[in-house]
C-alpha cells in the first residue's frame, strides 16, 4: 500500500517540478512570443496519463502487482488469512460485478464497523438496505453504526432501526439496544420488559444471559 502511495507522491512532485521548470525557463527568456501554456498542458497530460495507468493496473490497498492478478490471488486464499483491506477489495469487486447484490455491501459494513470506521460502515449498510429493504442484519448494522457515531447514545433513528430489525429476526441484539434506549430515557418498566425480550431470544450458552436476567428483574 505504502509503496503505491509513495510512487504517486513522487510522480506528483516530479510533475509539479517539471511545470515549475517550464515557467522559470520561460521567465528567464523574457517571455518571448510563445506562450508557456502548451508546455504546461503537456506536463498535465503526462500526469493524467500516469494517474490513469495507475488506476487501471493498481489499487493502493493491495500489494504492488497488476490489480486483476492480485485480486484473483486473493480470492484463492483462505478467508482467515486475508487482511481487512484485502477482504474489502474482494467485496468491492463483487459489488461491481453484481450491483444488485446487497450482501457485498452488508459484509463491507461489517468489516468497516470492526475497523472502527462507523461513518463508512453506515454508508455500506445503507447501500445494502437500498437493495434489500427487509435485510434485518443490515438494519441492525446501520443502527449499531449510528450508535458508534454518537459514542454510545441510541438516537431516535437508531432506535427505529432496532425496532424494525427486532420484528424481523430472533437475534437478541435489537432488543438489547432498545433496552439501552429505554434506560437512557429513564423508563424502568420498558427497560425490564425489553431486557426480558432479549433474554427469551438468547441461547442457553449466551454469555449475556446473566446480565439480561438481572436487568429484566430490576436487580442492579
Image (cartoon, rainbow, N blue to C red):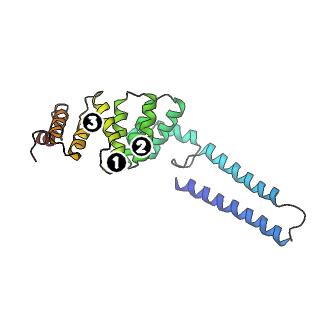
Please determine whether, in this image, residue 43 is positioned above or below residue 91.
below
Q: Is residue 75 left or right of residue 59?
A: left
Q: In front here: 218 or 49?
A: 218
Circle 2 sits on which residue?
121
User: How far, Cα to Cα, is label 2 from label 3?
Assistant: 18 Å
Comes first in the chain, label 2 or label 1: 2
Count neighbours of disc 3 (C-alpha within 10 A) and say few if under 14, some if 14 to 19, many if 20 or more.
Answer: many
Circle 3 sits on which residue?
174
Q: Is residue 52 left or right of residue 85?
A: right
Q: Are marks 2 and 1 in contact (CB under 8 Å)?
A: yes
Comes first in the chain, label 1 or label 3: 1
Q: Secondary structure at mark 2?
A: helix
Residue at image position (26%, 40%) is 177
Comes first in the chain, label 2 or label 3: 2
Task: Point out residue 39 in the picture as x, y percentages from the top left corner.
Answer: 80, 58
- Label 2 or label 3, whichever lies nearer to me, is 3
User: How far, Cα to Cα, is label 2 from label 1?
Assistant: 10 Å
Circle 1 sits on which residue?
148
Q: Are marks 1 and 3 in contact (CB under 8 Å)?
A: no
Task: Point out residue 74 in the picture as x, y percentages from the top left corner.
Answer: 48, 40
Task: Point out residue 136 in the picture as x, y percentages from the top left corner.
Answer: 34, 30
Residue at image position (32%, 41%) is 156
Amino acid at each position: 500500500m505504502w509503496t503505491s502511495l509513495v510512487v504517486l507522491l513522487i510522480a506528483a512532485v516530479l510533475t509539479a517540478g517539471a511545470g515549475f521548470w517550464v515557467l522559470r525557463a520561460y521567465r528567464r527568456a523574457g517571455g518571448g512570443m510563445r506562450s508557456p501554456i502548451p508546455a504546461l498542458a503537456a506536463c498535465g497530460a503526462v500526469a493524467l496519463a500516469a494517474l490513469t495507468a495507475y488506476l487501471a493496473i493498481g489499487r493502493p490497498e493491495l500489494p504492488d502487482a497488476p490489480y486483476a492478478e492480485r485480486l484473483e490471488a486473493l480470492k484463492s486464499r483462505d478467508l482467515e488469512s486475508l487482511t481487512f483491506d484485502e477482504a474489502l477489495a474482494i467485496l468491492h469487486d463483487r459489488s461491481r460485478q453484481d450491483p444488485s447484490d446487497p450482501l457485498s455491501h452488508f459484509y463491507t459494513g461489517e468489516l468497516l464497523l470492526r475497523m472502527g470506521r462507523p461513518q463508512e460502515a453506515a454508508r455500506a449498510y445503507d447501500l445494502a438496505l437500498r437493495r434489500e429493504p427487509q435485510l434485518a442484519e443490515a438494519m441492525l448494522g446501520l443502527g449499531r453504526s449510528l450508535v458508534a457515531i454518537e459514542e454510545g447514545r441510541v438516537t431516535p433513528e437508531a432506535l427505529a432501526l432496532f425496532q424494525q430489525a427486532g420484528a424481523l429476526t430472533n437475534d437478541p441484539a435489537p432488543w438489547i439496544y432498545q433496552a439501552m434506549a429505554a434506560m437512557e430515557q429513564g423508563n424502568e418498566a420498558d427497560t425490564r420488559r425489553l431486557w426480558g425480550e432479549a433474554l427469551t431470544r438468547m441461547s442457553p450458552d449466551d454469555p449475556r444471559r446473566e446480565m439480561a436476567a438481572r436487568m429484566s428483574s430490576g436487580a442492579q
